[in-house]
């Protein structure tokens, strides 16, 4: 196969498929092992300084904020993030200086809320390095290649663009059509957090709504920490096996964290907390503001349940539940005019 | 309500939403991004295209959008949808040819409809760091026709992009196919606060199709760094109808989050 072009992006997370097989064989539990533990133990055991990692969900949708806060409390550093639609997750991690390198499909933005002040400040001042560019489908298919135990996945994206030139992909002549095709390298993150609606003690997971990239991402992860809104019994899993989207085989730790995606959206349970998002976007305009935020909401509390109390407890959670179910109108302080 | 009694005042964003919504056809499919594209799509769904298949990159397929989602992955994007799928699934659909339209926005565009959403300045030492491709490169590569919504000025409509994030017609006729992109795909419309542009059949360069009410073709050219094709008659864009404005203001975006009223 003739290689036509090679991206200059740094290659992170790739493994020779035989090395990846060996990792899976030696580390992933095929039997049913009780993996319940608290957040502190999960972060201490399965995340390391300098790791290359990804967060499941969609940046501020069904993502493990609980995992992010605990990594900040434990002072992880020198991390490189696979920002496959990074939004609030990458913003907080970059602002708090845990992440100093980013492989970027989407980062430094807050979707409808605008650009991320902290993320932009860090990258524009050179404190954070973008090690490679890629597209969303590109990242998804990096994980898919890993999930299939392949060295790469062919795709018809990024061709002819600087996104390809700054990525870790290559373009080759497809032996079937003779056309140029992008070869997207497999990606096995050192660790991944995925937040789910329900799972049992072994890590058999159910997700309501879109699975985004998580089915492939779970299989690509070298170490997978699942945080769950609710623990369920094995019988419940076995009664509805079609609902399992991530089986226990991929999972290394199970942590029960109600409201673990706050201030993000958890489909069916609670909508995003725009009051809190606005507070973050305001405070994160300065380094001092970031410290103020972290002192108040992260370092100032021992665990996530204390943080939930701090942001409004049951009353706020009930409001976000009603907002999710369209029973009250959205009030977004960042969108108010005048 | 008598139409003659309604003062037809509207802002540029509302006009852009109306123009974009009219491009979308019933029974086709569209890949939708945050903000203005969602507004345009919701409008189309409520007016002439009830069976427009809406596709969101996080996996929402065929929702009945109840309100503006904040994220293209939030729960609104699969509200009463036919399927809550995955990114792999919907991107695969686009690669198969099942997504007819795709919306894109950008900080910079060139004459061939190539887009930059990655960086202003040097990649290694950015003046302004933008979010990157996200799904934009995928939409621009795989959807059959893309519709670009953006502000029109000389700094944005430029000769040479700082970074080519998403492919338009690349360097001209045949360039997309030569690069390996799916045959017969590419930018279809560019909708700005000044007018509506398409692309010349032969040269694949941007051409002016219509100017918005009160805007001259000279003004459009003055705000464009490259030479726009504008031979022949240039139409004036149809204004928003009272019904379009009512839907936008009362049902789709009552808080004015996107349309800014």
Image (cartoon, coloured by chain):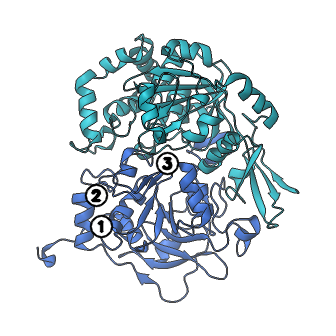
Chain colours: A cyan, B blue
Residue A273 in sight here: yes
Question: Mark 1 vs mark 2: same chain?
Answer: yes
Q: Earlier in the sequence, mark 2 or mark 3?
A: 3
Picture quadrant where residue A128 is located: top right
Eye-nearest disc, 1 or 2: 1
The residue wearing badge 1 is B46
Query: Subunit of mark 2?
Result: B
Q: Residue at the spot x=67%, y=79% of the render?
A: B203
Mark identifier at residue B252:
2
A319 over B215 or under it: above or below: above
Q: Nearer the viewer, residue A119 or A12?
A: A12
Picture quadrant where residue A276 is located: top left
CB within 8 Å, label 2 to label 3:
no
The residue wearing badge 3 is B58
Real-space Cα separation, disc 2 to disc 3, in angstroms = 22 Å
B101 displayed left or right of A186? left
Quadrant of the drawing holding the N terminus of chain A:
bottom right
């Amino acid at each position: 196969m003739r290689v036509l072009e090679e991206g200059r992006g740094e290659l992170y997370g790739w493994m020779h498929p035989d090395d990846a097989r060996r990792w899976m064989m030696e580390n992933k539990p095929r039997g049913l092992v009780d993996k319940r533990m608290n957040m502190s133990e999960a972060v201490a055991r399965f995340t390391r300084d300098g790791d290359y990692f990804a967060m499941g969900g969609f940046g501020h949708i069904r993502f493990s904020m609980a995992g992010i806060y605990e990594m900040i409390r434990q002072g992880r550093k020198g991390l490189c993030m696979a920002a496959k639609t990074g939004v609030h997750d990458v913003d907080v991690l970059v602002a708090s200086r845990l992440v100093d390198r980013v492989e970027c499909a989407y980062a430094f933005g807050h979707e409808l809320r605008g650009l991320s002040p902290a993320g932009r400040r860090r990258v524009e001042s050179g404190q954070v390095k973008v090690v490679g560019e890629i597209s969303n489908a590109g990242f998804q298919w990096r994980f898919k290649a890993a999930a299939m135990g392949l060295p790469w996945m062919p795709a018809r994206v990024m061709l002819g663009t600087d996104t390809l030139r700054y990525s870790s992909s290559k373009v080759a002549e497809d032996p079937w059509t003779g056309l140029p095709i992008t070869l997207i390298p497999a990606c096995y993150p050192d660790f991944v957090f995925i937040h789910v609606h329900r799972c049992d003690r072994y890590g058999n997971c159910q997700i309501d709504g879109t699975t985004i990239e998580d089915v492939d991402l779970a299989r690509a992860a070298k170490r997978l920490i699942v945080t769950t809104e609710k623990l369920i019994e094995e019988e419940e899993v076995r009664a509805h096996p079609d609902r399992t989207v991530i089986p226990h085989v991929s999972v290394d730790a199970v942590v029960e964290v109600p409201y673990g995606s706050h201030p993000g959206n958890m489909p069916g349970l609670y909508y995003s907390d725009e009051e809190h998002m606005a507070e973050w976007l305001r405070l994160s305009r300065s380094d001092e503001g970031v410290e103020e935020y972290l002192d108040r909401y992260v370092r100032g509390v021992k665990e996530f349940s204390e943080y939930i109390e701090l942001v409004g407890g049951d009353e706020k959670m009930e409001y976000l539940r009603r907002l999710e179910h369209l029973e009250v109108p959205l009030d977004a302080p960042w969108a108010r005019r005048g | 309500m008598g139409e003659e009694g309604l003062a037809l005042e509207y802002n540029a964003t509302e006009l852009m939403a109306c123009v974009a919504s009219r491009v979308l056809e019933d029974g086709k499919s569209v890949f939708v991004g945050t903000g203005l594209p969602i507004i345009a799509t919701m409008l189309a769904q409520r007016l002439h295209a009830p069976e427009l298949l809406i596709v969101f990159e996080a996996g929402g397929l065929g929702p009945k959008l109840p309100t503006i989602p904040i994220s293209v992955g939030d729960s609104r994007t699969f509200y009463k949808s036919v399927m809550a799928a995955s990114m792999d699934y919907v991107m695969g659909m686009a690669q198969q040819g099942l997504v007819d339209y795709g919306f894109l926005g950008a900080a910079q565009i060139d004459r061939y409809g190539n887009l930059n959403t990655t960086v202003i300045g040097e990649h290694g030492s950015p003046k302004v760091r933008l979010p990157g491709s996200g799904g934009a490169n995928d939409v621009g590569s795989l959807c059959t026709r893309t519709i670009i919504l953006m502000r029109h000025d000389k700094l944005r409509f430029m000769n040479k992009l700082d970074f080519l994030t998403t492919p338009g017609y690349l360097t001209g006729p045949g360039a997309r196919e030569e690069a390996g992109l799916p045959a017969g795909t590419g930018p279809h419309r560019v909708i700005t606060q000044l007018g509506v542009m398409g692309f010349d059949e032969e040269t694949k360069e941007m051409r002016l199709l219509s100017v918005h009410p009160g805007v001259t073709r000279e003004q459009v050219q003055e705000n464009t760094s490259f030479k726009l094709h504008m031979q022949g008659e240039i139409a004036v864009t149809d204004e928003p109808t009272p019904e379009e404005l009512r839907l936008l203001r009362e049902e789709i975006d009552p808080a004015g989050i996107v349309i800014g009223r």
